[in-house]
Amino acid sequence: MLIVRNGKAYIQRNDLAYICNSNVGVPAELMNGIIEQCYNGVFFVNDSNRYEFIEINDARCIEFLKSLWFIINFDEYSVLTEEPLMVKIDGIIDEKNALVKKYNSMSQEERVDNFQLAIENKHLEFKIHSAIDFLNYQIGNLDFSLPDGIISPGRCVPKRTRFSIIDKFKSVFNRNKNK
C-alpha cells in the first residue's frame, strides 16, 4: 500500500519487496533509500514486518511509486466501505481472468511475443492479494500501524467473517485444473 503526504511517500515492506523482485526498473535512489532504512543494508520481509511502512523522501522515487498501477493507493481504497471494496476486488479479479483467458487462447508463438501479459498477470495477482489485505484491515481482521500523522478514515463494520472473505476470493488462486 502506498500513502503520499506532504512530499513524502510511505510504502509497505511487502510492496517494496515485490517491486524489487519484479520486472520494473527500480530507480537507484529508491534502492539507496531502502538500504539506508535497513539493518546493515539487508532488507528482510516476513510476517512480522511485511505491513510496516518505509518512508521515501526523494521526489523522483515518489513519482515512480505512484506510477505503479499494481500497488494500491491508500487514499483510493480507504474511502470505500466493505461492499464497494469487494466490488473493486471483483473488478480486479475479472480483469485478471480476462487476461488469463486471452493468454490461454494464444498459440505458443503468440505467448512468446506477448510475454508481458504473464508479467501483468503476476502484477494483478499481487494487487488482488493487497486489496484483500486492505479489506481485512478495514474490517478488523488484519492489524497494522499507519505511519505517524496518517489517520485512517475508520474501519468498516464487517458483514462477513474473515473466512467468508477468503472463501469468496480463494477461487481466484485455486490452481486445481480440474475445477
Image (tube, rainbow, N blue to C red):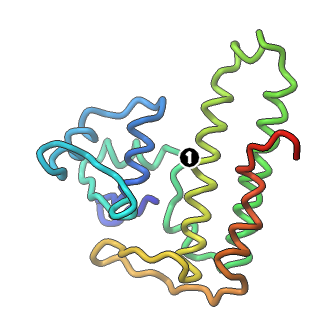
Residue at position x 69%, y 67% in the image: 166
User: Residue 164, image x and y in percent?
Assistant: 73, 75
Looking at the image, residue 94 lies above or below residue 167: above
Q: Nearer the viewer, residue 141 or 150?
A: 141
- The residue pinned by badge 1 equals 69
Looking at the image, residue 158 lies above or below residue 26: below
User: Residue 98, image x and y in percent?
Assistant: 82, 41
Horizontal side, residue 31 vs residue 21: left or right: left
Residue at position x 39%, y 45% in the image: 17
Q: Residues within 10 Å of mark 1 (few under 14, many from 20)?
A: few
Task: Give the number of callouts.
Answer: 1
Image-quadrant location for residue 79: bottom right
Secondary structure category for the residue under label 1: loop
Residue at position x 83%, y 39% in the image: 177
User: Residue 94, image x and y in percent?
Assistant: 80, 51
Residue type marked 1: Trp
User: Residue 134, image x and y in percent?
Assistant: 55, 68
Horizontal side, residue 112 vs residue 72: left or right: right
Q: Nearer the viewer, residue 115 or 59?
A: 115
Judged from this view, the residue extending furthest toward the left is: 40
Residue at position x 74%, y 43% in the image: 175
Looking at the image, residue 34 lies above or below residue 51: above
Horizontal side, residue 80 vs residue 153: left or right: right
Judged from this view, the residue extending furthest toward the top is: 109
Image-quadrant location for residue 160: bottom right
